[in-house]
Amino acid sequence: MLNKVKKIYMIGVGGISMSALAVILHHQGKKILASDIVLNKQIKALIDKNIITFQKGTCANFVRQCDAVIYTSAIDENNRDLILAKKLNKMIFSRAEILGGLSQNKRTISVAGSHGKTTATGMIANLLINSSLDPTIHIGGILKNISSNVWLGGSDILVSEACEYKDSFLKLSNYISIVLNIKPDHLDYFKNIDNVFNSFQRFVDNTTDGGVIIINNDDDLASKLSCKHKTLSFATNNKADLMATSIKEYVSGKYSFDVVFKGKNLGQIYLPCYGRHNIYNALSAIGVGEILGLNFEQIKKGVESFQGIKRRFEIIRQNKFITIIHDYAHHPDEIRSTLKLCRTLATDKLVAIFQPHTYSRTRDLYQQFLQSFEDADEVWLLPIYPAREKPIKDISSYKLQKDLKAHGKDSKYFSNFQSARQEIIKNAHNNTTFIILGAGDIVDLAYSFYN
């Protein structure tokens, strides 16, 4: 796809996936020109390593200089650089198309699911790196074991997070296709759950000849997928090839379980990360290990040495007065699961501080959001993070806060991070636990408490 291309212009390079692609393409000898509307940590790291030449905003000069343009799905069709590239007949590729090209002629392990795919990808990545299989890794978060979202390996194995938004994951050619779960999300694009399911069906249909599909048999929709290829199922409740049994909470919020594969007990795993839901992510990683012929000792070491993903249930500060945790949860199911976990750790008061992510998701899942905060004593709302979107009439965090209050939930609205931060400090007593939730720039509020 890019064999003869020497100079690439990447529009929106600051995204977690785009920044990883920049590293991979640079490693292939490409010169990378890049832009974004903000200068974030990912971009600064790329600049410091001389991987990209960066300019903020639109860059007509980069369009003219490059041989090809790569753009993120967050870019609007009216983007001036994209319009100019079309006018100049430049080769233009979406991020998904480039990632799909990288997956060709490789044993690509693609991790899909409405929730959990970043953590599962991280577990699989750590497992394969620790087992000396030398994979290339492309992940939608910072894997703490390598302090990066990308790992350049020398083998024919590629591990990639597979995002369903705008059917991006359909560009991938999968040797191992993993489906963790299927839930209503990205309804601004899919419109309804039937379209979401059909997209995941097409994803597993993309599995290459001789490949394997790994499916969560406990998930209502994932278990209904029609699989024409060899399948490995996993579960904790329903019957499956790979099962977690004898599940125990060995410390507060962390679980151990026995691994039973096709009726044989292989041994015990102690999950290093918080949350019962991570058993499913671990089972998907164990399934990959079995398919690739790893022994249980390798699998156990790879899973148990996993240090987690940044922004996934990160404990930012903890003392006798206050606990501050940050989590990327931005879907009602994720919020509910995270708060349930927090409830087991909180000794007294639990306050959820939430920044909704996109107007369309807030609108489409509004009733679910109203019902997702049961385990919080209080809910504090911050303005919606718009990402790629423009405001939608009558959809706001202020309205969500008022409706939560009408439903009997103690709630507050803050117009900015600073006022929320001051309120956290004011209420930092009596073993209060604050869980800061969201996929947007609310991370800045959370990380302001590191020092």
Image (cartoon, grey):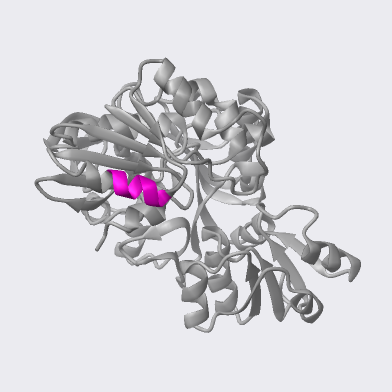
Quarter of the picture containing the N terminus is bottom right
271 vs 277: above or below = below
Q: Is residue 45 visible?
A: yes
Residue at horizontal 44 percent and vertical 25 percent from the top: 219
Whole-percent x, y for residue 112 in the image = 51, 42
47 vs 362: above or below = below
Residue at horizontal 80 percent and vertical 55 percent from the top: 78
Closer to the camera, 78 or 252? 78
Closer to the camera, 5 or 8? 8
Residues in magenta, as a range? 417-423
Residue at horizontal 40 percent and vertical 68 percent from the top: 134
Whole-percent x, y for residue 369 in the image = 46, 26
In the image, is 253 to the left or to the right of 65? left
Prevailing secondary structure class for the magenta stretch in the rendered image: helix
Whole-percent x, y for residue 38 in the image = 57, 65
In the image, is 223 to the left or to the right of 129? right
380 vs 42: above or below = above
Any magenta on residue 419?
yes
Any magenta on residue 53?
no
In the image, is 194 to the left or to the right of 224? right
Whole-percent x, y for residue 451 in the image = 24, 63
Residue at horizontal 24 percent and vertical 48 percent from the top: 425
Q: Looking at the rendering, which quadrant does residue 85 occupy? A: bottom right
Report the number of discs: 0
In the image, is 41 to the left or to the right of 131? right
Closer to the camera, 113 or 409? 409
Query: Outermost residue, top direction?
Result: 407
Q: Is residue 226 visible?
A: no
Query: Outermost residue, left direction?
Result: 320
Closer to the camera, 41 or 73? 41
